[in-house]
Amino acid sequence: MNRVKPARLQKGDTVGVIAPASPPDQAKIKQALSFFTELGLHYKLGKNIECQYGYLAGSDEERVEDVHSMFSDPSIKAIFSARGGYGTPRIAAQIDYEIIKNNPKIFWGYSDLTFLHTAFFQKAGLVTFHGPMLSSDLGDETIDPLTKSRFLQLFDSQPLIYDETISPLVTEIPGEASGLLIGGNLSLLVSTLGTEFELDTKDKLLLIEDIHEEPRSIDRMLNQLYMSGKLSDAAGILIGDFKECDTTRSLSLTLAEVLQHYIKLANKPTVSGFQIGHCTPHVAIPLGTFTKLDASNRKVIIESGVK
């Protein structure tokens, strides 16, 4: 597959905002839009962004329509997701990936958007961005300066470096590894298995993170990745933030015990402590980019996601 990097942003560009998963808080979207103005960007909201269908931000057809229309619109240079929640696995098979291939542009989000990150890369070769969203992050009263600064990677093509100047890191398994960086939310990665969008980890660096999952749930999902060969196939592993993934159960393994069990089984260079996921600050990274992991010295060098 040929990888495709989207063009970098320039001041004055117009970006699109869609809600391909759960319904966003409209007030928070309005609050977050001022951030794009600060970056010197104009914005356009998806036609169906105010739609709601239960826990979904509109019907599957409405959400797919916004994906297609934003990618097809030549005036839109980047597409930002309003929030995660749930919904992208329902629409992945309905997306026309020829539209994505023929109109490569910046696509940004995380959490439930992990399914689309995986689908866009595997079906269209598109490099995408794992980063904070409008309703769930940028609409807060204050935004962490580091979180904000990571949007600047969309304006230039310099490599990104993540080391302990950003957050404390822990070498779980020493060594060096390199490959294309993939992954995201663990729950969504596991949900690709057995589908046409099944996660391909062969010789790649795998990032995992999650939220509100008990250790036994994390155990179940990591066990499925392990038994399906996805952990063994990976060149290395990056452990992101696992927010509120503890338990009040008296009989339980800890989150650390669960993670370390599967890290040892995989036995690949692994570092934990990355502020990537449902956390503050939230360090945005490009997925599908060539990345070097020096686990022994706790440093990652990530190729730029834009051209």
Image (cartoon, rainbow, N blue to C red):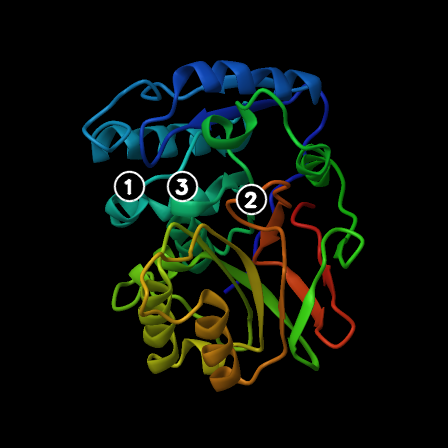
Q: Position of residue 277 (x, y in %)?
A: 53, 48
Give the alpha-carbon distance from disc 1 to disc 2, as whole Å: 21 Å
Q: Nearer the viewer, mark 3 or mark 1?
A: 1
Q: Which residue lies under the disc numbered 1? A: 87
Amino acid under disc 2: Cys
Q: Position of residue 276 (x, y in %)?
A: 58, 51
Q: Quick check: 176 left or right of 140?
A: right
Q: Nearer the viewer, mark 1 or mark 2?
A: 2
Label 1 Cα crowd, 10 Å radius (few <14 / some 14-19 / many 20+) = many
**Which label's residue is closer to the chain start, 3 or 1?**
1
Q: Which residue lies under the disc numbered 3? A: 99
Amino acid under disc 3: Ile
On screen, residue 262 above or below 23: below
Q: Is residue 205 visible?
A: yes
Label 2 Cα crowd, 10 Å radius (few <14 / some 14-19 / many 20+) = some
Q: Which image quadrant for residue 179?
A: bottom right
Give the alpha-carbon distance from disc 3 to disc 1, as whole Å: 20 Å
On screen, residue 141 above or below 63: above
Q: Which residue lies under the disc numbered 2? A: 279
Closer-to-camera residue (171/269): 171
On screen, residue 238 above or below 153: below
Q: Quick check: 134 left or right of 291?
A: left
Q: Quick check: 244 left or right of 297?
A: left
Amino acid under disc 1: Gly
Q: SS of the residue at dot 1?
A: loop
Q: Position of residue 36 (x, y in %)?
A: 62, 21
Closer-to-camera residue (47/220): 220
Q: Position of residue 231 (x, y in %)?
A: 46, 77
